[in-house]
Amino acid sequence: MIKNLSLQDLRSRALELLDQRVRIITAGMGLKELRAVMRGDPPTEKPNPRYRVHITSFIFHIRPRYYQQASTWFTHTFRLGYFTTLFFIIEIITGLILMIYYVPSPSEAYQSILRLEGNVAFGSMLRDLHRLGAEAMVAFAALHMLRTYLTGSYKKERSFTWLTGVLLLLITLFLSFSGYLLPWDQLAYWAVTIGTSMAESAPLFGNEVNLLLRGAPDIGAGGLLRFYLLHVVLVPLLGIVVLSIHYYKVSREHNISLPARIEEGDLPKDVKKEATQRIDFIPDLLTHEVFLACLTIFAMVVMVAFFYNAPLEHHADPQKTPLDTKAPWYFLWIQGMLKLGDPTLMGVILPTVIFALLFAVPYIDRNPYRMMSKRPVAVTLGLLFVAAVLVLSYMGTPGYGIETPAAIRIVQDLAPEEGVGALREISFEQLEPGIYEVGKTDTTALPPELGLVFIEFERRVNEAEEAGKLPGVQAVMIIEDWQAGLKKVTPRIIWSDPESGDQKTFEKHIFLHRDRGLGGE
Amino acid sequence: MARTQLEIFIGLLLVSIAVVVVIYVGFNEENRMAEWTLAQEAGAIEVGADLFEINCSGCHGVKGEGIPGLAPPLSDQFFFTQRLQEVGWEGTLEDYIIATVSTGRSVSTRPDQYVGGGKPAMPAWSQRFGGPLRDDQVHDLAAFVLNWEATALGKAEISELPAPTPGAEEAADPVARGQQVYVRGGCAGCHAIQGISAGVVGPNLTQIGQVAATRQDGVSAEDYIRESVVNPGAYVVEGYQPNIMPQNYGEQFSNQELDDLVAFLLAQE
């Protein structure tokens, strides 16, 4: 019997079995076809087996079978929506792993982050990935919206798609913002305190909304748990639902828009024909998408490994308001508006109006044309809006428009409450104990690193004196050995108050430990 | 079509590089975690130093040297080598510090050394027992106190600045000098003056400059204060226990210091 089975038979039988398996896995594509796909050959069978996959497999079923050539031009979409979705998926995966280590209670939350960073292999990388992915997701969602606006892709039948898109932007912002609180450090606590206090200033029901969000007049255990549950359950679920609708509208109903000049432009027929040619999803677009995913993973891994560190400040302290409170960058524009006027108007009513206008863009803009040259008003307004957001964001940075007393500012810049600052960068050995007085101490005799910082301190003090902010100023910096491996630095500034003439003193005690500079933030 | 293959090739390349980077990071993880933990402990000591200065130095001294009659030293050899045996504590010194700071102590373990028989010895500091500090702050305080071990056991030495308390001799104003006496002498541990100290064992002194004159007929505000410092039993405010305040301030302070302290207290209005 064995004699009857020639080697060739065995081989073809094996190939047949393998082919069967492959067809099951690829939902309809055989070995031959798969090879053709990899080579970039045209389909080998009829009807096109690359379309069969879309009928049998769920994942491919929700993808279109083909796109029109021009709608896939990189300079038309920049793949911004795809990247946003990709970041959302990365957030879900890293977020699920982070949930293993995180405890949503004020007494444990910060500790659990410390444990994650100091005790879990790749813990820091995981947190960085999650944080970076979140910021990228916000940025790409906003850019995606800008692109859609500029190419006029929200018009006519795509109006509703735009509406779900704005909803997704809101969801993305709230996802990011609710996650901001979870590490329970000073940064988180005060940014969210400011954010929710805006809700408090809403007319009529502000107090109730605030209570619902925070669970108490101030953020505490209740507030943290609420934000945690919103962040890990409710908002992601909402996001998935709205994203599905948004995506379905794009891929199954109206397709990605063609560039306006193909649709409306005065182009030769063959150019238009070429531009509207079909591109099969398999293999061209699928490969491209997987390639973009590889690129994203590569970029993120390199970023978090070498350049990006998720910030972690001191433990949240409701009793200690930091000098420079800062909203996350994507909310700086609101912080900027808050500096302009009444919080109810600037923090609640205006943002609501802005988002209402965004929602209504396709219904307000009745201009049927999509090309930029045919809609100058819309494009100008859009660019003005972008410029306004950028200017407001700049105004929202902590330094803008808020006058801190000179002495406090000088010391804060020297050794900020959070982060590093010039003083903490001096190596421990160079912090030579002694009393150094501005204008009297010979800076050349100091150890070089300390000398540089002291010269800067001197310069700032003298500058403030010349500006009339610190008349008759006397400033010292005292460095003491405090414990083994611990030094105490006391910058002290004494001046006479310009108005009352009273003598005023500001001093701060800064403790510096030898091992502080090794890691962490 | 070549584009598909190029993308597959570059994609694979990028993912391989990413994997290499992850492996590289993985090899460094042990080190990174160790360094991070060390830096975190250093940070805890820094925070603890700040908390100690605000909350503890009033009774235990600026550098944990203790104040006779008021509170024991925390930075001497005895504390690190014999204290646990003395009180019969089975756990670690860190646990002992955390437990003591958290719950406080209603009776001193060495009543004979402290005025008032050491009752109450130390208030509770943890929020769980009605104090002002969170658990992580208590932990940071313990890290700071433990960091005295090296100098207490003579393993390390630290330099002292030439001037005893920097800035002390610069202050020409007796009130400013008096404030330093107030803090250094340990008054701040038990008495409250708004903006300076928050002790609750003794009477609040925020307005003592006004109140002192009205306390006793025929006794001027200055005499009233001076007598109360030197001889605490002379006039005891209603509602407060006698014999709690140290009786030896007359010997402990120089005449100059006493004058400054009185001047400072008179200025509290």
Image (cartoon, coloured by chain):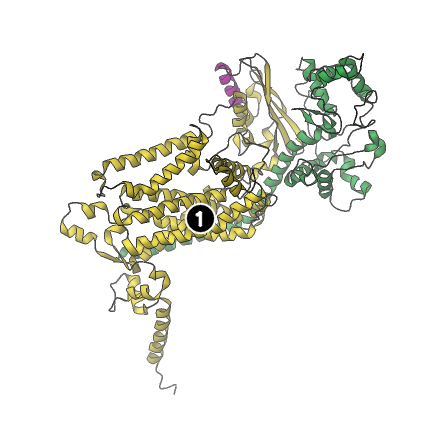
Drawn side of residue A101 relative to residue B178, left or right: left
Q: Quadrant of residue B174?
A: top right
Residue plotted at (68% across, 39% down)? B126
What residue appears at the point 17 percent right and 45 percent down from the top-left corner? Answer: A265
How many marks overall?
1
User: Does residue A108 show up?
Assistant: yes
B77 up-or-down from A99: above or below = above
Q: Tell me the quadrant of the picture where the C terminus of chain B can be found.
A: top right
Residue A294 x, y percent position in the rendering:
38, 52
Q: For this rendering, which residue is in front, A264 or A299?
A: A264
Report the side of B230 relative to A95 (left or right): right
| Chain part drawn in magenta | A455-469
Give the amino acid type for the residue marked by disc 1 in the picture: Val
Q: Position of residue A357 (x, y in %)?
A: 34, 39
Callout 1: SS: helix
Q: Nearer the viewer, residue A229 or B179?
A: A229
Q: Where is residue B118 in the image (x, y as percent from the top left)?
A: 81, 33
Task: Tell me if residue A280 comes above or below residue B162 in the rendering.
Answer: below
Q: Residue at x 81, y 36 (%)?
A: B108
Judging from the image, what is the letter of the chain drawn in green? B
Chain coloured yellow in the rendered structure: A
Dominant secondary structure, magenta: helix
> Does the magenta run of residues contain A464?
yes
* Residue bearing the label numbered 1: A301
Q: Is residue A181 magenta?
A: no
Indicate the position of residue A66 as horizontal and vertical percent values: 27, 58
In the rendered image, which quarter is residue B142 located in?
A: top right
Q: Which residue in the rendered view is the most extreme toward the bottom? A: A1
From the viewer's perspective, tell me whether residue A63 is left or right of residue B235: left
Subunit under mark 1: A
Q: How crowded is mark 1: few (under 14 residues within 10 Å), some or many (20 or more)?
A: many
A58 lies above or below A149: below
